[in-house]
Every structure is written in structure tokens, then in C-alpha cells.
Amino acid sequence: MKRSSLGKGLAALLEDSGSDITSSPRITNGNTAIVGTVVNVSLFQIEANPFQPRNEFEKQALLELSQSIKEYGLIQPITVRKVGFDKFQIISGERRFRASQLAGLEQIPAFIRIANDKTMLEMALVENLQREDLNAIEIALGYKRLIEECNLTQEQLSQKVGQDRSTVTNFLRLLKLPEPIQAALRDKKITMGHARALLSVDDSRMQTKILNDILKNELSVRRIEEYARNYSGKKTSQKPKVKSKNKSTVLSFEEQKLQEDLSDFFKTDVLIEKQTGGDGKIVIHFKSDAELKKISHLLDL
């Protein structure tokens, strides 16, 4: 017993070496459970991964997968690590594990490997980030955890997940958006394109206002990008020259929308100029007498 524990480290000395699947084959439910192999493991011996980056699993998708497992069995093994005598913890495959529980299975195939907490977190995050059903916020949170908890740089992270560094950066920037926008992106009410356009607006209240209009009017990404450019451009063009009681102010999102709607209505450029005091003017451009007549006709003059 002592000899078999030599060189195994502290873990081998803390428990009976016969229970350590890394030191010798062990019969588990009639199968040899050894690191690096796939064996059938009882579901009662498996616990969830505390580092699981996914917080939600779609119920309908789980039910469909469980039905498939009932009919064909679990084709793709999950990956687990040993955490004690006949105890295993999921590294990857929690969705398959949950679906197997719903299917009423007693055992499932599992690939057994060794991993410390940091390595396990990294493997779980990277493996889950490869899934196609993750939403953008789940991906961003996964990237953030890899950087903060695994001490990775953005460059190292991009290599591990197989993405360009700019892609990684764009996902991380999503976490700077207000919570209502993150929730809308998570629930797929807006797209990644909408979110990137909103990032160019540095006022959180304006971002939320634009979000509400996107949801209400189903605005396209291109239109939001245009609003964002107008907002940013007018904000940067404001330079304190001569002190005045009535300084021009940046148009709100609703005012920008009104300006565009008026331009569409008159089929020409319309400019709304508003002062901080509340007064302002609407300028309707025309290029010919014919255009002026059309405008006056639309105004019913």
C-alpha cells in the first residue's frame, strides 16, 4: 500500500490509494475506470460543474435531446474529473448530463481526466464557448472569466478560443452596455449589430432610449448606425466659441428620427436646429422652383 502511494503526491496519501483511479484500474459498475478512457458512470456519482459558464438551458431543447437519448442512447460522452472515491465532476457536457437525467438513465458514458480547479475552469469555459447555441452575453461573460480567473491576456484568449483579438474585444465591450441592452441581446431581441452601434453612443440614457425605439419600431442596424453617427458627430462638433444665452444643442434620438421622417415626407433635406433655451427652427431645403411648389403643396399652402 505504501509503495503504491510513493510519488503520487499528497492526494494519494490522503485517501486509500486503491480508490484513486489515477494509480490503478478500478472496477466501477463492472467497467474499468481509468484516466484517459471512456467508461459508464452512474449519474448518482456525477455532480455539476461549479464553473459552468451557462446559467440557462432551454427547456424545450433539453426535452428534445432527452427524447433522442431515450431512443438512441447518449452517443457523445461527457467529460468528467475525479474528485473523490467514486465521485466525479463534470468538465463539459452538462446539457447532455441533464438530458440524460430527464431520460431516466442510470449510467452514461464519460471520458475521465484529471484537472485542477483552474485548468477545469479553463477547459469548461473554452469548451462551452465553442457551442453554437450560446448568446452573445454568455460568450462575453465566458471571455471575461477566462481573462480574470485564468489570468489570460486578450491575445492568449484569442488563441485559445480560435478568434481574432478584435472579435474578443468586441464581445468584451458588450459588457459595458446598460443592463436593459444586455438583457435584450441575451434574449435575442436585438442583434450583435445593434449592440455594436449602440456602443458608439457614450450616453447610457440615450442608449436605453434608442433601445426602446428599436424594440418598438423594429429599426434596422443601418438606421441605428446612422443615428449614432449623427449623435456623435454633432456632439464632437460643439466647440465653445462665443458665449451666448442660446447655444445649439444636440438633438435627442426622437428629434433625429423626426428630422429623418420629415426628410422622407418632403423628399428633400430637412434640418432641425434647436437651442438650449428650447427655441429653434426647421429648415427645408429645395433646389428649384418646382421643388418649392411641391413642398408648398405638401404643406397645403
Image (tube, rainbow, N blue to C red):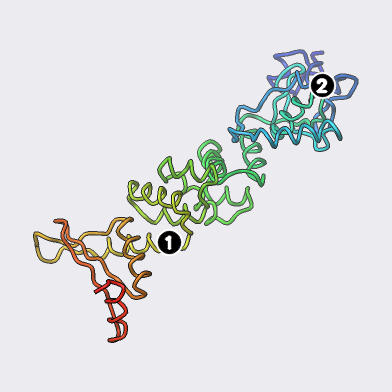
Residue at 61 percent across and 51 percent down: it is: 159
Which one is in front, 250 or 5? 250
Of the residues shown, which amino acid type is indicated by label 1? Glu
Q: Mark 2 touching mark 1, by CB under 8 A? A: no
Would you identify the image quadrant in which residue 23 lies? top right
Q: Which mark is residue 106?
A: 2
Across and down, in percent, residue 17 comes to: 78, 16
Across and down, in percent, residue 198 comes to: 42, 53
**Label 1 secondary element:** helix
Vertical placement of residue 217 versus 88, above or below: below
Residue at 27 percent across and 71 percent down: it is: 299
**Label 2 secondary element:** loop
Would you identify the image quadrant in which residue 296 lies? bottom left
Closer to the eye: label 2 or 1? 1
Residue bearing mark 1: 225
The quadrant of the rendering that contains the C terminus is bottom left
